[in-house]
Image (cartoon, rainbow, N blue to C red):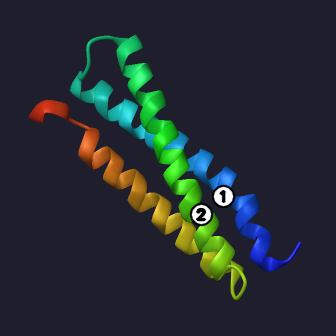
Amino acid sequence: MTRGQWGCVAAPAGGLATGVLGSVLLAAAWRACDVGVNGAANGLALIFYGVLLAIISAAWWGAFIGYTGRWNLTVALLGGTAGAAVMVWILVALLHVPNGYRC
């Protein structure tokens, strides 16, 4: 496997890990703020948001590691991780308190 093909390996794994991490952090924020109707409604929303985040971050991981990984795999992994952390932060920052409820 060439160094440029590492993006095909890292994209699904990184995307799935990012989606799960974002869902877990968002669920913790919702639980702390007592947001939502019930657990079933929150669970469906978390699945939707987690899948959406996983797809977006998989594209990021694949493009970044596939392009940058040709030259330096360590920098590519650090950049992929930093980009995924920013995506999770944006997801939690935008969705942690819907309708402006402050906890």
Residue 23 numbered mark, or none: none
In the orientation shown, which residue stands out farthest toward the right?
1
Residue 88 or residue 49, whichever sits in front: 49
**What residue lies at 48% left-to-right and 67% top-to-bottom?**
82
The relative height of residue 59 versus residue 17 in the rendered view (above or below) is below
**What residue lies at 57% left-to-right and 59% top-to-bottom?**
59
How packed mark 2 is, by other alpha carbons closer than 10 Å (few <14, some 14-19, many 20 or more), is many
Q: Position of residue 36 (x, y in %)?
A: 26, 19
**Which mark sits nearer the N-terminus, 1 or 2?**
1
Where is mark 2, residue-wise? 61
Where is mark 1, residue-wise? 11
Q: Quadrant of the N terminus?
A: bottom right
Q: Position of residue 101 (x, y in %)?
A: 11, 31
In the picture, measured across the screen, residue 5 lies left or right of residue 91, that is: right
**What residue lies at 64% left-to-right and 64% top-to-bottom?**
62
Query: Which element carries disc 1, helix, strand or loop?
Result: helix
Q: Residue 98 sits in which quadrant?
A: top left
The relative height of residue 92 versus residue 36 in the rendered view (above or below) is below
